[in-house]
Image (cartoon, helix red, strand yellow):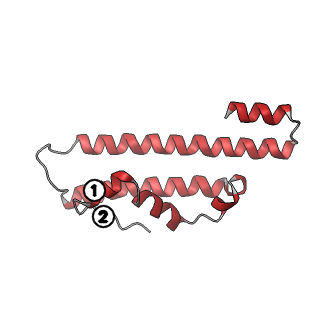
Amino acid sequence: MKKILLSCLLMGCGTISNVALASIEQYVLSVEKISEKYRQDTRNFFSSLDAQQTSFTPQQHVQFCGIVANYVEQLYQAADRNRDSLARQFRQMTKQDVIHQVMASKEMLILKKYNIQCDLK
């Protein structure tokens, strides 16, 4: 990211471009922070489970889906706050698009085998 900013400055980009790049960098940093928090929350959740357990209890299901729902909400809010700075194909991103991406992730597909499905809206 620093190389992009440096090359932009060297090429004489205007203030508007610098603001857009700052917003993009802010978005990337937000997504990294949100993703790290999600990884930590899921790691803590799974480490709290009994090693012999083969499925979630109803309470665990609610807790896990709450973690996923929070992750989706934060990702969507980050995209929404920085919508004008995102590439054209991502500016129209809806919350449903974010939900679809999260639910299509490798870890969620693995959990689907165990009938762990979160009804996100």
- Position in image of residue 82 (x %, y %): 67, 53
Single out the residue that lies furthest toward the left: 52
Quadrant housing the C terminus: bottom left
In the rendered structure, which amino acid carries the disc numbered 1? Leu
Which marked residue is nearer to the observer: mark 2 or mark 1? 1
Residue at image coords 68%, 54%: 86
Query: Is residue 30 depicted above or below 71 in this figure?
Result: above
Which element is circle 1 on?
helix
Identify residue for label 1: 111
Q: Pick whichever, 20 or 105, lies toward us.
A: 105
Residue at image coords 19%, 45%: 49
Instruction: Return the mark for residue 47.
Output: none
Q: Pick whichever, 60 or 54, lies toward us.
A: 54
- Residue 114 lies in quadrant: bottom left
Residue at image coords 45%, 40%: 36
Query: Is residue 39 depicted above or below 74 in this figure?
Result: above
Q: Residues within 10 Å of mark 2 (few under 14, many from 20)?
A: some
In the rendered structure, which amino acid carries the disc numbered 2? Gln
Identify residue for label 2: 117
- Position in image of residue 61 (x %, y %): 26, 59
Which element is circle 2 on?
loop
Left of 23 or right of it: where is 67? left
CA separation in Å, label 2 and label 1: 8 Å
Q: Are marks 2 and 1 in contact (CB under 8 Å)?
A: yes
Query: Is residue 72 depicted above or below 27 in this figure?
Result: below
